[in-house]
Image: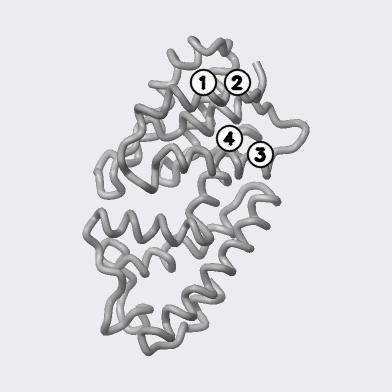
């Protein structure tokens, strides 16, 4: 079992009809996570485990505001078992893939114990950063009916951050701090590069709405 093109094709076929219409968590997202994972992996990485985890980590995708959101990765791991067995993975590999799937989630709060789990977590979080991260953030916020920003105080200088109502607040609450939360050195480096792109966007965004970006957002 390896990270061959044929195995990837089979995994994509398995998940293609299972992915919902959420543009932030679709087949393209899985492709990007796999690309990110390959960029982070090294020669010691079990690529067949990483490949399967990359494509099966969002088998169960619950909305951000669902009270069971923190259970999604565990449910994805459970559902993955018969799929992996049919693809020819052995029991040891299946357990490794399931752990990586369970531990990738921010809300699940499970510590990744293997190299593949750490890589998957970083690879998934990288997709929340940079140009694609900007697009995904506004897509998710729009689906949840959240306002782009607070017109009276766009960067929460005189109020508490509230990313349940304001899309821009989520940047400060979570996204801009992701580089410091990366578990791999390569993941951190890529995350920092992508965050710089987001900061440039924020500066232009602030200018267009007649504001300036507070330094506290730059030095998150």
Q: Position of residue 118 (x, y in %)?
A: 60, 40
Q: Position of residue 132 (x, y in %)?
A: 48, 56
Asked whether, in this view, residue 45 is left or right of residue 106, the answer is right
Q: CA distance from mark 3 to mark 2?
A: 16 Å
Query: Sequence order check: which comes first, mark 4 or mark 3?
Result: 3
Q: Residues within 10 Å of mark 2 (few under 14, many from 20)?
A: few
In this rendering, the answer to whether 115 lies above or below 205 is above
- Of residues 194 and 11, the one nearer the viewer is 11
Residue beneath label 1, please? 10
In this rendering, the answer to whether 167 lies above or below 215 is above
Give the label, 3 or 2, closer to the camera.
2
Q: Residues within 10 Å of mark 1 (few under 14, many from 20)?
A: few
Residue beneath label 2, please? 6
Residue at the image position 45 percent from the left and 87 percent from the top: 212
Asked whether, in this view, residue 163 is left or right of residue 109, the answer is left
Secondary structure of the residue carrying numbered label 2: helix
Residue beneath label 4, please? 117
Give the label, 4 or 3, closer to the camera.
3
Q: Are marks 3 and 1 in contact (CB under 8 Å)?
A: no
Residue at the image position 53 percent from the left and 33 percent from the top: 54
Give the numbered dot on residue 38: 3
Q: CA distance from mark 4 to mark 3?
A: 13 Å
Q: CA distance from mark 3 to mark 1?
A: 18 Å
Query: Sequence order check: which comes first, mark 3 or mark 2?
Result: 2
Secondary structure of the residue carrying numbered label 1: helix
In this rendering, the answer to whether 79 lies above or below 103 is above
Residue at the image position 36 percent from the left and 69 percent from the top: 169
Q: CA distance from mark 2 to mark 1?
A: 6 Å
Query: Sequence order check: which comes first, mark 3 or mark 1?
Result: 1
Q: Are marks 3 and 2 in contact (CB under 8 Å)?
A: no
């Amino acid at each position: 079992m390896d990270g061959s093109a044929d195995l990837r094709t089979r995994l994509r076929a398995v998940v293609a009809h299972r992915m919902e219409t959420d543009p932030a968590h679709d087949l393209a997202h899985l492709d990007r996570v796999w690309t990110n994972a390959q960029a982070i992996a090294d020669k010691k990485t079990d690529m067949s485990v990483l490949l399967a985890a990359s494509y099966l980590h969002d088998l169960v995708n619950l909305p951000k505001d669902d009270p069971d959101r923190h259970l999604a990765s565990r449910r994805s791991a459970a559902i993955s078992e018969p799929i992996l067995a049919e693809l020819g993975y052995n029991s040891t590999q299946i357990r490794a893939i399931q752990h990586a799937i369970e531990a990738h989630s921010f809300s699940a709060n499970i510590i990744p114990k293997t190299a593949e789990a750490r890589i998957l977590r970083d690879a998934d979080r990288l997709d929340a950063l940079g140009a694609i991260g900007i697009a995904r953030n506004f897509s998710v916020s729009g689906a949840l009916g959240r306002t782009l920003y607070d017109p009276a105080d766009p960067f929460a200088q005189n109020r508490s951050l509230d990313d349940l109502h304001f899309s821009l607040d989520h940047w400060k609450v979570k996204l801009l701090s992701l580089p410091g939360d990366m578990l791999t050195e390569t993941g951190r480096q890529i995350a920092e590069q992508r965050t710089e792109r987001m900061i440039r966007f924020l500066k232009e965004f602030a200018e267009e709405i007649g504001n300036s970006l507070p330094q506290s957002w730059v030095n998150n």
